[in-house]
Image (spheres, rainbow, N blue to C red):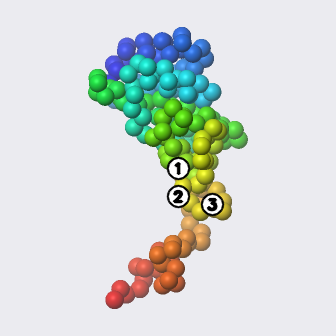
Amino acid sequence: MPDATGLELLAQELGDAHEGSVQDTLFFRDRGTIVVDAAHVRAALAFLRDKGYRFLASVHGVDHYPEEPRMGVCYELLDMERLDRLTVKLRVPTDAARVESVTPDWPTADYQEREIYDMFGVVFYGHPDLRRILMPEDYEGHPQRRDFPVGGEPVLFTFSDAQGADYTAWGDEEQT
């Protein structure tokens, strides 16, 4: 892990290379995080790749409800030679939840960006195949948002269609 001083130096280099890209740094529990402006995410990740962080371990969404900007995207980068980990975060407002896709540079981001789009509603423009991945195409809403209504109509899954039961009824029936 970069120590607090190393994180600040790395963020300073990134800010010098791409003016306006770095918004903040966080060092908490021996984990370094650079908060970047959403407009500069691809350039920031390319810069960090050149610094040795060549493995994009994960991309995930975050909902900071009720704060604005509400939607967040986190990129977990690894430097396999130094065994170093770095998190890059960004936030976008709900009414303009758009981030440039990093899939052209990091192919591992493909399905992860689709999942964030599906569950949180963040649109990754420039993505080669941005569509729902977990929910049906005609599903309305984004289930991982913190203000998404809990409960309602149960979802029927294809394996239980033949029995005419949904997932909530399995515990009530006696299995034979």
Q: Amino acid at mark 3?
A: Glu
Q: Amino acid at mark 2?
A: Leu
* 1 or 3: tag closer to the N-terminus: 1
What separation in Å lies between label 1 and label 2 (alpha carbons)? Answer: 7 Å
Mark drawn on residue 115:
1
| Residue 151 falls left or right of residue 84 | right
Mark 1 surroundings: few (<14), some (14-19) or many (≥20) residues within 10 A: many
- Dot 3: element: loop
* 1 or 2: tag closer to the N-terminus: 1
Q: Amino acid at mark 1?
A: Glu
Residue 48: x and y in percent read 45, 22
- Dot 1: element: helix
Residue 38 versus residue 109 in the image, above or below: above
Residue 64: x and y in percent read 56, 41
| Residue 105 falls left or right of residue 141 | left
Residue at 29% x, 23% y is: 82
Circle 1/circle 2 CB separation < 8 Å: yes
Circle 3/circle 2 CB separation < 8 Å: no
Q: Judge by depth and name the residue closer to the eye, 166 or 146.
A: 166
What separation in Å lies between label 1 and label 3 (alpha carbons)? Answer: 13 Å
| Residue 25 falls left or right of residue 5 | right
Mark drawn on residue 39:
none
Label tally = 3
Residue 57: x and y in percent read 39, 37
Residue 159: x and y in percent read 47, 75
Residue corresponding to mark 2:
134
Residue corresponding to mark 3:
137
Q: Is residue 113 visible?
A: yes
